[in-house]
Image: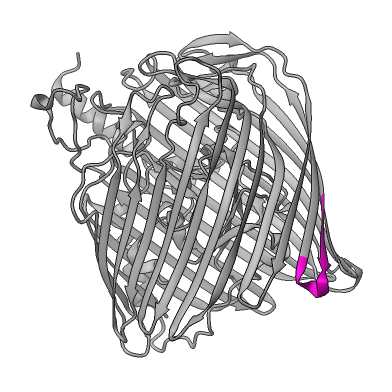
Amino acid sequence: MQPRACRTVARATATQRRTPWNALRSLLPSPVVRRARLTLPVHTLHWLVAAGYLLAAPAAPLELAPLAVEALPLPAADRTAAATVLTPQGERARGRDLPELLEESAGVSVKRFGPIGSFATVSVRGTSANQVTLFLDGVPLAATESGTVDLSTLPLSALSRVEVYRGTSPVALGGQGIGGVVNLITVDATRPRTTASATGASFATQTTALTHARPIGHLHLLAHLDLLHTAGDFPFADDHGTPLNPADDQRPRRENNRQEQASLLLKADGPAPAGRWRATSLTFARATGVAGLAPRTASEAHLSQGREVATLGWEGERGRLAGVTARLFGEVERLRFTDRLGEVGVGRQANEETTTSVGVTVTAVREVGRHGLTLLGQGLDERYRAINRLADPAAATPQQRRVATVATEDQIALAGGRLTVAPAVRYARYLYDFAGTVNFAGLARPLPDRPDAGHLTPKVGLHWAATEELALRANGGRYVREPSFSELFGNRGALLGNPELAAERGTTWDAGGDWEGDVGAVAVALGYTYFHLRLTDLIQLVQTSQRVARPENASGAALRGHEVEGSVHLGRVGLHATWTHQTTEDRSGDAFADGHPLPGRPRDEVAARLTWAGEQFAPFYTLHHQGERSLDRANRVRVAARTLHDVGVRWRPRGGASPDLTFEIDNLTDDATADVAGFPLPGRTVRAGVAWSF
């Protein structure tokens, strides 16, 4: 064993390596890295950069135009969908993240592995996270490696709106998800402005966001920087793995849970022949400790991550090319997981995983009489390579998958435009190039050949404007999902791959309506949807030991439920609430699980927000309830229901000028609660923030 002084130096050196800058450096060419050095910790830069922005601001504030919301795609893309639009306006001073915002949508469940900045996923209508497709400005976020997009890597402060499509996938977006689709729209580059925000919270949590947009001639340019630091050392309930023996229960602090992350969004657009070109780049870097799952927590395991998403597009605006859009996009993601003491997963780990994705999408939208036609073609090349640095790195074989997609939709207007019928069909062809071996826990496993596959997935939607206040809608479709690379090859030593997995298949339908009107002096908006899903060859994780799971195809599952969403406004008082009630059933035929509810799916979820819009002060209260759920297919390990209460107040000067101040207390009752697989979540958290516009 090393002397104590040596271990202390080793930990300090490891901490220096675990910075977002070093994660980002791994994506840059070596000459660039050699010329760049960063000596200050990121959380110190938060306040220095914010102060610099404040001091450099012009004495006279800019005259800001009203917020320019980008074209609403709901009626154009799929007006028949059960969809929700979320806007993070006014959230800059609160320091919230994307998972918190998504929890306000009906039918949506967010799963976290810890506090803000921790790995988080979104589930829609009880489906798994890899059955939900995420897009950034209409470009698919490649979830090739895990099949799941980590929501914590997408800064909320960089978004102007979030569109949630439940159970249906608009053809104009190109992708599909059995559960649904989430489209993230970044902030608009056409409106000149400079904004800055900073928050401080419990457990040494600090966030900073800076945005600057300005036109230069016919060009529109925007830069947005987002920084996060948290120690994540919150107290949590630890039963030492003996839930029936309260005598050994303790409330220690979470260790090795530090998070450092940074993201940079760059946007530009300008005139082009017959239209306009647009370019976007989102760079993300993170370094974090991996605390593991109580009662056995990890003290040294850590993870660094870097991601770059870039798009270059052209939009036709004139002549025959009006309505035609072409995009070239690419994504590179690199993960480095180090567990030299074997505290997480199986054995000692030093893994590096690199995923690259390059694609092109061409979309054409035309109106021909009563028909609104959409045609789409997309090509995608996905590559994945996993290296075990404790073994021979040269032994790792890169794996490749190419996907070609064509799709078409016709939105037919009938009954004077009050009735819309929208049939659509999508065909995707998957070409696999798998060869060599893949490493798991230091062992090389040969890969069998995987046959190519093609999937035809039709859908149809209906929308009827019954009255000016009432609209009815219905959707039905068939969806297919090919396994992700981590499901096929394994991941970080805790997930054993299964190269022989079959594709998941599902059919879904829903029906509901929306009503919006006035009841006396009260403005009311209500929405209701009934949904039903049937899944076959469902991919589920089967625990093979205490710390290792293997994905396997189950015979099937059924999910059905109700979504209710509503808002009420009376004068200065506003109430928004959602309720999702769902019933899930395992239809695998396995004696220990058949007929049981699916793990990780609570029966009821409720979110409510009560606000009072004062002239300067705006107090608010939010409630989040999640019912009891199991963690295993046999329903033997359960997580108790939780109800969390948050209170806060927002202050702005008269006339709505800057600054915008917010103070709030989350989890007011300090409940010791847990989420995915029993990962603990923070108790009472105090946050204060300020946002400024120039």
- Foreground residue, 290 or 308? 290
Would you identify the image quadrant in which residue 427 lies? top right
Image label count: 0
Q: Is residue 27 visible?
A: no
Residue 634 painted magenta:
no
- Foreground residue, 62 or 455? 455
Q: Position of residue 272 (x, y in %)?
A: 79, 69
Q: Could you tell whether 102 is left or right of 138 in the image?
A: left
* Viewport quadrant of the N terminus: top left
Would you identify the image quadrant in which residue 470 lies? bottom right
Image: 286 above or below 691: above
Q: Could you tell whether 41 is left or right of 454 in the image?
A: left
Image: 6 above or below 63: above
Q: Could you tell whether 386 is left or right of 78 in the image?
A: left
Q: Position of residue 296 (x, y in %)?
A: 25, 23
Residue 410 painted magenta:
yes
Would you identify the image quadrant in which residue 458 lies? top right
Most frequent secondary structure within the magenta stretch: strand
Please tell me which residue is depicted at 39% across the width and 67% down the height of the picture. 92
Q: Position of residue 673 (x, y in %)?
A: 26, 41
Q: Is residue 556 visible?
A: yes
The span shown in magenta is 408-419
Please tell me which residue is depicted at 25% across the width and 64% down the height of the picture. 647
Please tell me which residue is depicted at 63% across the width and 73% down the height of the picture. 220
Image: 31 above or below 516: above
Residue at the left extreme?
A: 247
Q: Position of residue 223 (x, y in %)?
A: 52, 65
Q: Could you tell whether 232 is left or right of 582 in the image?
A: left
- Foreground residue, 503 or 233? 503
